[in-house]
Image (cartoon, coloured by chain):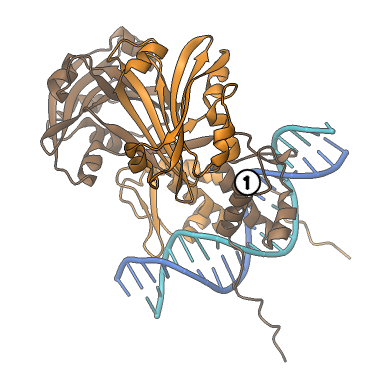
Chain colours: A brown, B orange, C cyan, D blue
Amino acid sequence: MTMEPQVDPMLDRTTYREVMAEILHRITDGPWGPGTLLPGEIELAEEFGCSRTTMNRALREVTEQGFLDRRRKAGTRVRMAPLRQARFEMPLVRAEIEKAGASYRYALLARDSLPAPDWLRARMRLPAGARVLHLVCVHFADGIAFQLEDRWINARALPQVLKQDFTATGPNEWLVATVPFSEVELSFMACAADAMAVDQLGHAPGDPVFTVERATWWQSEAITLVRLSHRKGYRMTTRY
Amino acid sequence: MTMEPQVDPMLDRTTYREVMAEILHRITDGPWGPGTLLPGEIELAEEFGCSRTTMNRALREVTEQGFLDRRRKAGTRVRMAPLRQARFEMPLVRAEIEKAGASYRYALLARDSLPAPDWLRARMRLPAGARVLHLVCVHFADGIAFQLEDRWINARALPQVLKQDFTATGPNEWLVATVPFSEVELSFMACAADAMAVDQLGHAPGDPVFTVERATWWQSEAITLVRLSHRKGYRMTTRY
DNA sequence: CAGTGGTCTAGACCACAAC
DNA sequence: TTGTGGTCTAGACCACTGG
């Protein structure tokens, strides 16, 4: 009684990473210029000597990187202009500062509970009469002001926020540990330094200030709006 | 002779999207708080009534979104601080302008071929004596200056660039169609308006200007460095 | 060294969209 | 209508790494 020989163990199997590399090569430095219609998954899988599943994953990831355009029935096509997407990590300020090897310090400058002003209600789609908590705080790196945080929190959605005093830790750390978010709007811009930026960040009046504005909602309900103003010379950088 | 009954067709099969949604729910608004160690893939697959493959994909995508931390043998753990990553699409200016429903116009302001200045050689890791092409151009939306482009191209890596005159189309469109890139460094910052920004973008001297700087390499060889200065009030926004 | 995630396979049905 | 990508399954071996 003889056993059937075992199927080959995974010796030289083609991995989806290898497939990806070859596909990228053919796109960026090979025959598949912009606009090219690629063969179907089955055909490609045969050519590369892998299963359709593996080929599908390779093509999916290359698509995610912005090089391909895939549609049922229409097939897979090389993007005319490889829409590059940059990924920016938005860490907690504290992590950002400590990662740079600097010491972190936090200070609360102002804390007010008030009915939402009109501009905020419009900006965040807040109902009339909603109460909000307004906070202003500074984050220091090695004792020097690094970032000024101007935040509004919807107390209607988060009543417990009114009991937090935020003297020891910033509202951001409390928020990430407390509420989720389903919708985020993020903007980067250059603003002129206002009085607060002059006082706290050491800018001259009118100086260019790199500013991040982030608004978040959870299930259509406004959570928070924050403006982060950065110190002189700050750059937000990413590599890929 | 009877046929075996066919296996159930895909009626109520659990999709990886449903699994993802439930996992996210448990993380953001359920029992899996930060630091929680999740059950293994097999166990979860059984609980969710799906295959391990499907569970794996769901967990992989949630991980990509920055909520989980996975390591062989150690298992899957909920990130303490869900590292938020924002994705920014960096389209061609032309596409950006036309997408907004405005008409696009392009103008070349300056074109010079010269040996790379020292600061550029240092910035781009260029060899001594490398020749570069320096271009300055403007992109208009509905006739109004929208973006000022100040670009340096490594003619040592791309000799054919010297034959392009770039009077009709911008260097960016030529570059994306000509060279790939293996390494990109992207920065956002706020700069004070210089003379060029004053003349071309209508800024007042010293006005805050939202600036993007992008440097690209291909196989360790410098390709191009570009600074994009934007008109007053420009915001780079993303939603997710 | 043993457990967990990483990945490949072959086969199958489904859903969307171009023709 | 029909072709192409989208996804699920069951089973298997591998590779990394924590204990």
Q: Nearer the viewer, residue B138 or B2?
A: B138
Q: Position of residue A102 (x, y in %)?
A: 16, 43
Q: Nearer the viewer, residue B55 or A91?
A: A91
Q: Is residue A13 visible?
A: yes
Q: Chain of mark 1?
A: A
Residue found at the very far bottom of the displayed protein: A1
Q: In what quadrant of the picture does the C terminus of chain A appear?
A: top left
Residue found at the very far left of the displayed protein: A143
Q: Position of residue B192 (x, y in %)?
A: 29, 20
Residue in the picture at 14% in, 23% down: A200
The kind of residue tagged 1 is Ile
Location of residue B100 with respect to B34 vertically, above or below? above
Judged from the image, the secondary structure of the residue bearing numbered disc 1 is helix
Residue in the picture at 20% in, 24% down: A162
Location of residue A52 with respect to B23 vertically, above or below? below
Q: Nearer the viewer, residue A127 or A43?
A: A43
Location of residue B214 with respect to B36 vertically, above or below? above
Q: Is residue B84 left or right of residue B147?
A: left
Q: Is residue B28 visible?
A: no
Q: Nearer the viewer, residue B230 or B238?
A: B230
Q: Residues within 10 Å of mark 1 (few under 14, many from 20)?
A: some
Count of residue discs:
1
Residue in the picture at 51% in, 14% down: B140
Q: Which residue was labeled with disc 1? A: A27
Q: Is residue A11 left or right of residue A49?
A: left
Q: Position of residue A34 (x, y in %)?
A: 65, 38
